[in-house]
Amino acid sequence: NLFSLQGQAIGHLKDQVDSNIVAAVSDPTAVDCPLVFVSRSFEKMTGYSADYCLGRNCRFLQPNIPEFNKRINGDELMRMREFCTRVHPKGHSITNLLLNEQRCGNRFWNLLYMTHVECDDRPYILAVQSILSLPMPSKIITQDATAACLDHCEMDLYLFLE
């Protein structure tokens, strides 16, 4: 598997990363900046297995309703896209707050820190994230709640945050 990184410089991290650290590594030199490593805690937090994650861009964590995602995460998505697609020096970092979804559909506030790093003279993006225990408005707590609201309401961001 191209993305397993077995025997490479960061492949050994899977067994050494503390189980409480939610981390992921992506390759900004590859098309669409795919994940090349996720910690076991990332798998537990998101409900997605490493087999599913590796080789994919992490946007699978974003809400599945595109217009809703754009409204709720729009500015952060633009900042992340710029961070992942432009060349930045080692150590350049960004912090985002995003509404994300677990595999089961439950939503969570994701505080995401990303930084450009190098390993064996190759650039990577290291991401560390945490679920923030912030109130979740009832209209956005699940995909079903949002879909029901969208069936009866205009797509107004303030409506979702009431």
Image (tube, helix red, strand yellow):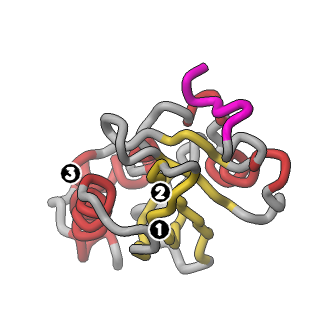
Three-letter amino acid code of the residue under disc 3: Glu
Q: Residue at x 31, y 35 (%)?
A: 31
- Looking at the image, is 62 positioned above or below residue 22? above
Three-letter amino acid code of the residue under disc 1: Thr
Q: Check residue 5 for magenta coloring.
A: yes
- The residues bearing labels 2 and 3 have C-alpha atoms spaced at a distance of 27 Å
Which of the two discs, 1 and 3, labels the residue nearer the N terminus? Answer: 3
Q: Residue at x 36, y 68 (%)?
A: 89
- The residues bearing labels 1 and 2 have C-alpha atoms spaced at a distance of 6 Å
- Identify the residue under disc 2: 125
Labelled pair 1, 2 in contact (Cβ < 8 Å):
yes
- Identify the residue under disc 1: 115
Q: Nearer the viewer, residue 69 or 92?
A: 92
Q: Position of residue 128 (x, y in %)?
A: 59, 65
Q: Nearer the viewer, mark 1 or mark 3?
A: 1
Residue, far front = 121
Q: Quadrant of residue 65?
A: top left
Residue 162 horizontal side relative to residue 9, left or right: left
Disc assigned to residue 67:
3
